[in-house]
Amino acid sequence: MASSATLTSTHLPTLRTILEEWNQKRPATKGFPVPLAELQKSPPSKDASKDVIVAFRTRPPLPNEAAEKFHADPDAEDAVLDDAGKLAPVEFCAGITVASAEPGVFFAHVPGMKWSGPTLTHKPYEADLAFGPDVDNEEVYQRTVVANDMLSLALSGGVGCILAYGQTGSGKTYTMESVEHRVARDLFAQARIVGKRLLFAQDGDHAIAETGDIFEFNVTFLELLGKHASDLLESTEEVDASGNPVRTEVLVREDKVGNIRPNLISSTVSSSEELEELINKALSHRRTSSTLRNAASSRSHALLTITIKNTLLPYADEGQLILVDLAGSERYEDSKDHDKQRMEEARDNNKGLMNLKECVRAKAKMATEDGFVHIPWRSNKLTMLLKPIFDIESRQPSKAMIIAHVSPHIQDTIHSTNTLSYAAPFKTVPPKPRGPSPYDAQDPRTWNHDKTVEWLTAQFTKRAMKSRQAEWNVKAKSAQLAGRKLKPLADLAPGQLDLGVDISKLCPPGLTAKNLGMLYTTQFVQRCLEARTGEALTQDEVKSTAADVFASLFYLILTAKTKKRNEIMKSRKKLDTEGTYGDAPRDIKDYDEEEFLEAQIYYGNDWGKIIIAAQKLCKNEGKNWTEVYPKTVDDMMVKFRAHKAAADREAAEKVEVEE
Ligand SMILES: Nc1ncnc2c1ncn2[C@@H]1O[C@H](COP(=O)(O)OP(=O)(O)OP(=O)(O)O)[C@@H](O)[C@H]1O
């Protein structure tokens, strides 16, 4: 498995000639069907309803990049010498060609070797959009975020997520920072348009209607380096012995109601300038860490989350925009010379990226087929943080966009094919429309306001009756001790019993059980205290009754969730994920997950190819796949272990020589 870097440094002139010949014969690149100016007049695009959108992007080569990054082989037969007879510096040679912008098609030029000499294979990869080196950041933003209506989605209570994926140095940060700044530029203007529309529809307060300021925006910025999460908005002067800034470790875990809310600094912003300032602050912290920690930014995931609350509909789901600059994807080959800590980070990052791949692919499949796929978002911190787009029980509309970045150089083609084949399978057709969940008396998440009020009233009535009875019992007992007899408790007409809590205040119009279920117990108790009526219940009694009622609601929601999940699992066919390479053989027990992942990274594209080839052979020869599959994996693992052992030996010898 010769690397493309070795092949290209040895045979670059020959490869360049082959590429030029191919270029002359290929059809002209197809541009975007709708020019940018027209698109800006009439967004969103026809595919705005897709759940997962894939875009490819490649950047221009940077000045002197090829000469500085790659080195020619002086012993190669076709090595180029300059006039002075010295080895000429390496010049740029394209590894990627854009065949079509929309639908997107990239050709990756993969160098190979035959007995007759070097070869180039031109592999096509498809996406929804493909951006070549001449497309600038504004156009990328317009054709991705704007054309797919991501801002409106978040402003209407949905979740929009944009992920930048790719090899280190391929341009992820360049794209994501530009998206972040443009979101800051446009979000508030867009919010005002939506706000004014809503206010006029509701005939609301005129003063606010003038400005349309009905949204509250909160911003968090998290960095995930290996397994460690920290807050990029936390300013710190403190540095450790190695000069690394010391930041508080942030816990990423699911709380009892199933939310993932890391304890981050959450800043409220109300203008483009304020959001821009926060973004700049977080990015400067990330850059400082990067300088101090040897390019830590390329090894860490950065997640900017903007949470949007509609103050006109305080109980509606909060919208979210999640912008993710993912860590650079590394192949095993590239990370094997790192120290232990870097190796671990690379392994954790790759695990996160692999898991992200499984989740996005499962989401794309769920959106287009009538089936059920388990989305393993709980398996990793990165995907846990992206729960809002992966939780199948959430009724919030969500959309994920992945922008896969590749280097323009032919020497990086092997990385590029890994990136493109990672992202290309996410491309989907538009999903079927989803309606609201049908009413289910046992599932509070489906109750409307009236049903919620009815249930709350019944709950508080039950408890008020009990407490009235208990009070009477005490009085009756003391009366009995005094030799008297107490009058039996009189029946009360409906509405006569003081529940201790004003239900219409606890649950004002618009609020449903689903909204209440999203509160923490303390928040629910607080609401009940605020809705307390007279002296029927003491403060402590309200507190304990409220906690009791909330526990009942929570229990009902949990039971309904479990039931629903089981129903989905039973009623829908399990979608066939065979043939999609890289799935961990959960039935193969001998390999631990880490080693297995390392092997997949080492094989890259070939992993999938070998499995698919074995599948075909198995079908043709009528063999049993459950036997052939483990054998195929075993063979690959044997080769991988041999390769690793040789690499370790080589590394040990190197250390000995250096010593
Ligand atoms: N489309 C582009 N046009 C011009 N320059 C670009 C483009 N994309 C990236 N660059 C430049 O390429 C270099 C590498 O880009 P960038 O830092 O964004 O890569 P990255 O994938 O985020 O790397 P890392 O994973 O190491 O953080 C930067 O100097 C950046 O300015």
Image (cartoon, rainbow, N blue to C red):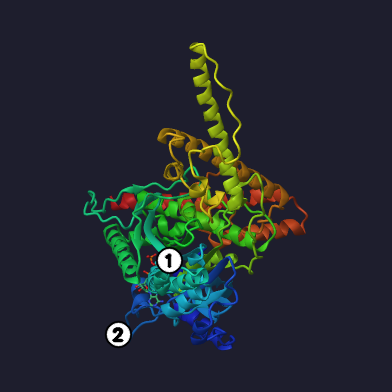
Instruction: Identify the amino acid type marked 1.
Output: Ile
The residue carrying mark 2 has its beta carbon less than 8 Å from ligand 1: no
Q: Nearer the viewer, residue 373 or 570?
A: 570
First of labels 2, 1 by sequence position: 2
Residue 390: x and y in percent read 55, 56
Disc marking residue 582: none
Left/right placement of residue 454 relative to residue 210 reads right
Point 38% across, 51% down: residue: 229
Can residue 484 be seen here? The reply is yes
Can residue 595 be seen here? The reply is no
Q: Secondary structure at mark 2?
A: loop
Q: Secondary structure at mark 1?
A: loop
Q: Mark 1 = which residue?
A: 214
How dense is the environment of label 2, judged by Cα within 10 Å: few (below 14), some, or many (20 and up)?
A: few
Q: Nearer the viewer, residue 81 or 632?
A: 632
Write down the quadrant of residue 619 in the picture.
Answer: bottom right
Residue placed furthest toward the right: 622
Residue 478: x and y in percent read 48, 16
Disc marking residue 84: 2
Instruction: Identify the amino acid type marked 2.
Output: Ala
Q: Quadrant of ligand 1?
A: bottom left
**Above-or-below relation of 245 to 128:** above
Badge 2 vs badge 1, beta-carbon distance below 8 Å: no
Write down the quadrant of residue 99 in the picture.
Answer: bottom right
**Above-or-below relation of 544 to 566:** above
